[in-house]
Amino acid sequence: REPDTTGVREPDPLNYPGEHPLQPGPEAEEISPSNEHHHAAAVVVLRALPKPWTLGPQTIADLAPKVAAALAAGWTPDDLSAYLSANSAGVNSPAAVLRSRLTKDLPEPPRAPQAAPSRIDVICESIGAELHARIVEAACARKDQQAGRRLARPASRVRNLTEQAFAGFGYDLETIRAYAESLPEAPGATQTDAAGTSGVTADGWATDALRCPQPA
C-alpha cells in the first residue's frame, strides 16, 4: 500500500531554506565592459613583448589581470610595454621579473606632457590683465553698438574676441601692446577682491573674465 501524500507539500528545489540558488556567487559576476577592454589590451601587451620576454599562454593568462590593473590605473599600452621590457640583460626568469615589475616595483604611471600654452595665452601674459581688458572692452563695445544692446560677456566670448583682436594684428606682440596702450582704461578693470583672484568690477565685469580665459 502506498503512503497517503495528500496535503503534503513538495519542497521547492529553487527555494531551499537558507539558500539562494538564483543569486550568483562571486564566480558568476559579470566582467564590466571596461574590465574586458583592459584585459584584452593586457593580453595584447604581453603577447607583443620582445625577446627575451616572450611568454607562454599560461603565463600570459596569469599576468594579464596585473597588466589590466596597470592600464586601468593610467598606464598606456606603449608606456607599460616599454617599462616591462626594459633592462633585459641577465634576465633568467622573464615571468618572475615581469610579475615583480607589475606588483611591488610598479611606479605611478607617467604623467602626460602638459600642452604648451597657446600664443593667445602667451600674449595675454605678456601684456598683462589691464591691457588685455582694454582690448576686450573695445571689442565688446563695438559688438554692443552693432547689436544695439549690451551683450553678455561669458568667458568663451571674451576668449573669441581676444583671438579675433590678436589675429587682426597678426599676433604681433608689440603691435598689440601699442594698440592696447592707445585705448582708454577699461571701466573697473583693476577692481578685484581682497585675494586679487575674482569678483565683480564696477560695471559688472567678472574679474576672472578679464583674464585671458582658458578654452573650454
Image: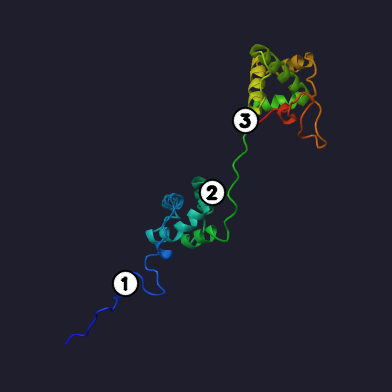
Residue type, numbered disc 1: Pro
Q: In the rendered image, which residue does mark 2 sit on?
A: 75
The quarter of the image holding the N terminus is: bottom left
Q: Residue at the bottom extreme?
A: 1
Q: Tell me where residue 121 sits by quadrant.
A: top right
Of helix, strand and loop, which one carries label 1? loop
- In the visual, does 78 lie left or right of 30? right
Q: Position of residue 111 (x, y in %)?
A: 60, 45
108 and 25: which is toward the camera? 25
The quarter of the image holding the C terminus is: top right
Q: In the rendered image, which residue does mark 3 sit on?
A: 215
- In the visual, does 104 lie left or right of 191? left
Residue type, numbered disc 2: Trp
Point 39% across, 75% down: residue: 17
> Exactly how many numbered labels are in the figure?
3
Colouring rule applied to residues: rainbow
Label 1 and label 2: CA atoms lie apart by: 48 Å
196 and 73: which is toward the camera? 196
Front tag of 3 and 1: 1
Callout 2: few (<14), some (14-19), or many (20+) C-alpha neighbours within 10 Å?
some
Q: Position of residue 203 (x, y in %)?
A: 77, 23
Q: In the rendered image, which residue does mark 1 sit on?
A: 13
Of callouts 3 and 2, the N-terminal one: 2
Q: Position of residue 8 (x, y in %)?
A: 28, 79
